[in-house]
Amino acid sequence: MTQPGSTYTLDRMAATLALDEPVTRVRLVSPARARALEALGIRTVRDLVAHYPRRYIDLSSKETVASARIGEQCTIEGAIHDIKLKRPRPKLSLVEIGLVDETGVLMVTAFRQPWLMDSLKAGMRIAVAGKLEFDYGFKRMTNPFIEVVGEGVGGAAGMIIPVHPATEKVSTAWMRRLVGNALAQTCGAHDPLPLSLRAKYRLMSRQTALSCIHFPQAMGEAAEARRRLAYEELLMLELFLMREAAARTAGRQPVQHVTDGPRVRALAAALPFTLTDEQAAARDDVLREMAAPHAANHLILGDVGTGKTVVAAFALAAAADSGGQAFLMAPTEVLARQHAASLGPLFEAAGVAYGVLTGSTAPGERAAVLERFADGAADVLIGTHALLEDDVSPANLTLAVIDEQQRFGVEQRSCLLGKGAAPDALFLTATPIPRSLALALFGDLTLSYLKHRPHDTARRTTKVYAKQQRGHAYDAALAALARGEQVYVVCPLVGKDAGERDAKAVHGRSVEEDADEALHPAVSIEDDADLAGDDVAAATREAQMLQQSTFVDYTVELLHGKMGSAEKKQVMERFRSGETQVLVATTVIEVGVDVPNATVMIVEDADRFGLSQLHQLRGRVGRGEKPGAAFLISASKSDAALARLQAMETTDDGFELAAFDLSLRREGDILGNRQSGASVLKLVNVVRDGRIIEAAHADARAIVAADPQLEAPEHRALAREMRIVFEGERAQAGG
Ligand code: ADP
Ligand code: MG
């Protein structure tokens, strides 16, 4: 029954090692395909095996052209009546297919997939899956999933077809075949999860889980597979965090900070306002942790505008009072500069010496700042990712503050903390996560919540308008300008950075977009051209248009992602000072920017944003004493998209909105990963997977308590796996 022990072990070993071989070891992965896979971040066999489907197409429930309902996701099978390639514009190609079944004709349009002309011919039977639209008298699908019927590829002959993220060079059909080969070659690999844990939660073996997540026979199987793999991802992360925390302070003496020194007191005296009760409590929490003999690991959770920065300022001053040094790291240049601008005067009044370091700091200035920090002359260094660089080496780092920490990865966090012996850590976040999840996601830490804003922002209103009613929003903006207030206009055309958009145009849809597919209308031709074309030009035109037509009596400026940072800084400065009154911006302003006189925000094409993102955006207005108004303009005719946006009108609670966004997701879309703290979490969704997270947290604790070095036989595979996953991470971050 069993094979001789030695052969069996050898096979398992070989299969396990095969996981970390280059992806070219997989059958049919030529050097050219390997290069194409690399574009998706797939380098090893393991990467390929973990390249999970972004969704599934359930061919077991098909509709006819006549029975399919407009506005819904469906699968329709038929014969290709005609197929042609069109090039309406130099950069735009589209394939148009007329598909017929016994009940009618369906028009299918596929943008930017000219290669379809090679694989599809008139007369072939295909199944298409996507959202049914209706226009110019035809039922229609745009960019649907297309499968040639009766030609099951790579194990996809079943009724459920996995759709893996693909590229122009490696189609989804090829991806299925390659993943299938990779699974076959690693069959028999060690399962890193100890049997006891698998039994405890009735989890599939890893091998079964991998085969079920890639090629499920039923949707229930995919869900079970995901449960197992998500648990594994989390257990690894928890173990990593706990061991890392232990290593960080092992044999080192964390500083017990002085928390009522002269700078802390001078800072309190210099504040132009009194702290709210919550802020004062948060300050006390942080300072108590800093004074304690262990290395603090403290998180302040507070919605946008709740005043987290000033609480952090007390921590920074305490570090200075204690003869230590501190970092304040923010995710964007604009934000880092803003911190310097708002905290600078307070620090000067309090006698805290500080410097600023970002990617755009000139070399000479950079050297001077680094020197002051290396010899201990400066107390606080405010900056961006630039702080992570090797030559940023403080003399005596005792505190690291990370603002908007959700923007940083686990690795970046530990890199910053690694610049001191056993520094205290303070994290600020606007991501609304409940206490238990925060505990689980960060290892062990203390928390403070800021639930209320210093100003009564209940006076901020949010209104959703259809595109043709947007005049109301611009009227409100003009009224605000007449009162001497300022206005943001956000247009997502310039939104994400161009690189990402280009990639999207080539790869079809991104995972994120796909997750929201049911909510977002299909991309129209105009939008599509905008995505591919020069979007800076589009944004510039938009700004000019607003200047010349709507806001003729005021000054309009544009802020977009491709601007140099000096230029960005100047634009922000002019807006802050009131020299310009209207800022046409991208999501650059999403995080933290603070201009209290700005009271109106208009978000064009609001349906392109997630609700949490919109919530962050609208947090930019109504920050001062004057009431604010946010207007969300939607071009979508879909009821679902409007209903989703209308949730913004009814609630001001970021956590509720995040949950609402999730509740709207399609059932078939079981794969989501928008808020994870680490890129190793491919399957976990921190909002929905609360119970799995907590279980993994508790289990990791028990394991580390019993076997800190993970040396016991049943933990060895786990330890090996954890090292590879996280070291792999590191290699990627470096390269
Ligand atoms: P966030 O939590 O989003 O980072 P900030 O720290 O940027 O918020 O604070 C938002 C605004 O509120 C800033 O202009 C800040 O100066 C102001 N502020 C903070 N605390 C108070 C307070 N207690 N009273 C009045 N204004 C405050
Ligand atoms: Mg902030």
Image: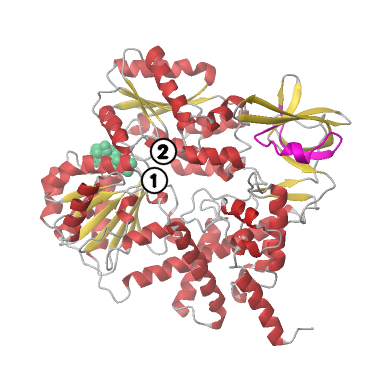
Q: Is residue 586 magenta?
A: no
- Judge whether residue 129 is colored magenta: yes
Q: Nearer the viewer, residue 449 or 216?
A: 216
Q: From the top left corner, tell me how far across and down residue 255 is, in percent.
A: 22, 67
Q: Where is residue 637 in the image (x, y as percent from the top left)?
A: 61, 24
Please state if 184 lies on the left or on the right of 604 as rendered: right
Q: Which colour scheme is used?
A: secondary structure
Please state the extent of the stretch shown in magenta in the rendering.
Answer: 110-133
Residue at (48%, 18%) from the top-left corner? 470
The residue shown at (19%, 39%) is 273
**Which residue position holds label 2?**
616
The residue at label 1 has a CB less than 8 Å from ligand 1:
yes
Q: Which of 271 and 208 is in front in this view?
A: 208
The residue at 66%/77% (across/down) is 12
CA distance separating discs 1 and 2: 8 Å
On screen, 124 above or below 479?
below
Residue 691 percent across, percent down from the top left: 54, 59
Along the line of sight, which residue is nearer the eye, 490 or 194?
490
